[in-house]
């Protein structure tokens, strides 16, 4: 049967992707960020997940506001890299896990999550930055993936509680999968950032650290927050942290934290936390 | 009635939240920016920017914003409140436009748009 073995919360800031493509991992500005993921990749190499469920948001690369789904799940055997306006990044296409994806979609819909099911999906920085931070791709990716896109752009957004419950439903889906499958769930985005208006670049390191505490120890306290409170703490764009709650909802109360990192040198708080389930 | 998620009397960071009202107002300019994800569209835009904007139905004010390379597409004053377009004219449209010739790289404070200065 399927099993959730670990969860990861991580930022997906697009400039991380640009720095990666230009080989800037060892520059003074970027080294603290990239170094934090070295032990995460080693840890994942040992855990050997079969599938990564990537909870992210599309920033207009594949979805547009003509039709913008609240929750959309990939059900394909392959996901191409989207062109975000500069051409396609030099990354191999993503291997899907078709059979598990189809099971996941069925289980979630029957669990009363009314998803948009996508048999074609192109993935962009919200998905790709966490992928190349956490997984190797030389020559191919060392894990299959299922994209799960959440609307965190165009209000009304799903509530924090709804995101957490989606994670719980993902856990039920994984545990009802009939074949052995080791699954890691990644919740991406954030942390604090404000990209419009006179306070462009505003971050809040204290609230970010508090979020890292609560997502580990007391996610229920985060589920109770309204979008208003979340945006007042983390900025209008920082509200995408609700995607970490999908990850947390998929993990049990017995999961223990393995890694934690925070770096905020630019305009977005860049956070990382990993949780591992007991064997 | 569901628990309200927003309090419109308390603006976030003295700015605007990208909701359906703003998305509708900024829809055409967002659609233009979004189209630039396709290389063929970028070529068409480069070849004739004015025609491209007309094709996407931009208003004169919206065209002026694009001509000025005002990548955050600041709100236009109107009836006592500002139309703040695309938040995702924010990062994404901006990044798409930035990749095109004639579009200056706007960094640092260049990305900062002060709503009060535009009203």
Image (cartoon, coloured by chain):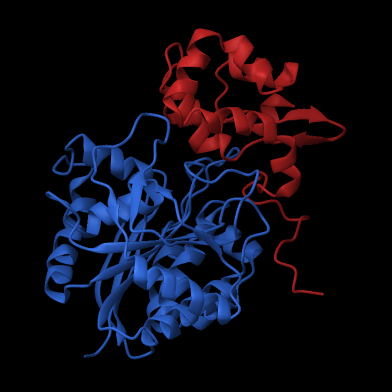
A75 in relation to A185, above or below? above
Residue A117: x and y in percent read 52, 62
Q: Is residue A107 visible?
A: yes
A221 in relation to A146, above or below? below
Between B79 and A275, the residue placed more toward the observer is A275
Could you tell whether A87 is left or right of A56 in the image? left
Q: How many numbered discs sit on the rendered protein? A: 0
Residue A15: x and y in percent read 34, 40
The picture quadrant where one finds residue A30 is top left
Residue displayed at 37% across by 56% down: A11
Residue displayed at 31% across by 67% down: A52
Residue displayed at 54% across by 36% down: B90
Where, quadrant-wise, is the N terminus of chain A in this rendering? bottom left
The letter of the blue chain is A
Residue A250: x and y in percent read 41, 79
B1 in relation to B118, above or below? below
The letter of the red chain is B
Residue A137: x and y in percent read 17, 52
The picture quadrant where one finds residue A54 is bottom left
Between A125 and B15, the residue placed more toward the observer is A125
Could you tell whether A87 is left or right of A231 in the image? left
Q: Is residue A219 visible?
A: no
């Amino acid at each position: 049967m399927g099993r959730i073995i670990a969860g990861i919360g991580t930022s997906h800031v697009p400039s991380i992707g640009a720095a990666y493509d230009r080989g800037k991992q060892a520059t003074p500005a970027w080294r603290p960020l990239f170094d934090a993921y070295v032990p995460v990749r080693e840890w994942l190499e040992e855990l050997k997940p079969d599938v990564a469920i990537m909870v992210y948001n599309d920033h207009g690369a594949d979805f547009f506001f003509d039709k913008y789904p609240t929750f959309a799940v990939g059900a394909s055997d392959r996901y191409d890299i989207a062109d975000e306006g500069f051409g396609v990044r030099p990354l191999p296409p993503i291997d899907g896990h078709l059979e598990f994806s189809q099971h996941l979609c069925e289980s979630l819909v029957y669990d009363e999550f009314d998803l948009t099911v996508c048999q074609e999906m192109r993935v962009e920085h919200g998905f790709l930055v966490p992928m190349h931070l956490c997984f190797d791709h030389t020559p191919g990716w060392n894990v299959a993936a299922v994209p799960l896109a959440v609307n965190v752009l165009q209000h009304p957004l799903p509530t924090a509680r709804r995101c957490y419950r989606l994670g719980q439903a993902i856990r039920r889906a994984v545990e009802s999968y009939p074949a052995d499958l080791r699954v890691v769930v990644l919740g991406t985005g954030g942390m604090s950032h404000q990209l419009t208006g006179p306070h462009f670049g505003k971050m809040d390191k204290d609230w970010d650290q508090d979020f890292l505490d609560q997502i580990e120890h007391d996610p229920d306290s985060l589920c109770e927050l309204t979008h208003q409170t979340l945006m007042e703490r983390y900025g209008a764009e920082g509200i995408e942290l609700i995607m970490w709650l999908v990850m947390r909802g998929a993990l049990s109360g017995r999961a223990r934290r393995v890694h934690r990192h925070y770096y905020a040198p630019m305009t977005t708080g860049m956070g990382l936390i990993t949780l591992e389930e007991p064997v | 009635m569901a628990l309200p998620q927003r309090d419109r009397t308390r603006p976030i960071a003295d700015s605007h939240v990208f909701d359906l009202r703003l998305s509708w107002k900024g829809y055409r300019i967002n659609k233009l920016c979004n189209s630039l994800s396709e290389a063929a569209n970028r070529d068409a835009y480069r070849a004739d920017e004015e025609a491209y904007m007309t094709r996407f139905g931009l208003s004169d004010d919206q065209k002026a914003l694009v001509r000025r390379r005002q990548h955050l597409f600041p709100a236009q004053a109107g009836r006592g409140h500002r139309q703040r377009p695309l938040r995702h004219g924010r990062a994404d449209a901006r990044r798409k436009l930035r990749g095109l010739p004639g579009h200056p790289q706007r960094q640092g404070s260049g990305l900062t748009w002060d709503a009060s200065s535009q009203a």
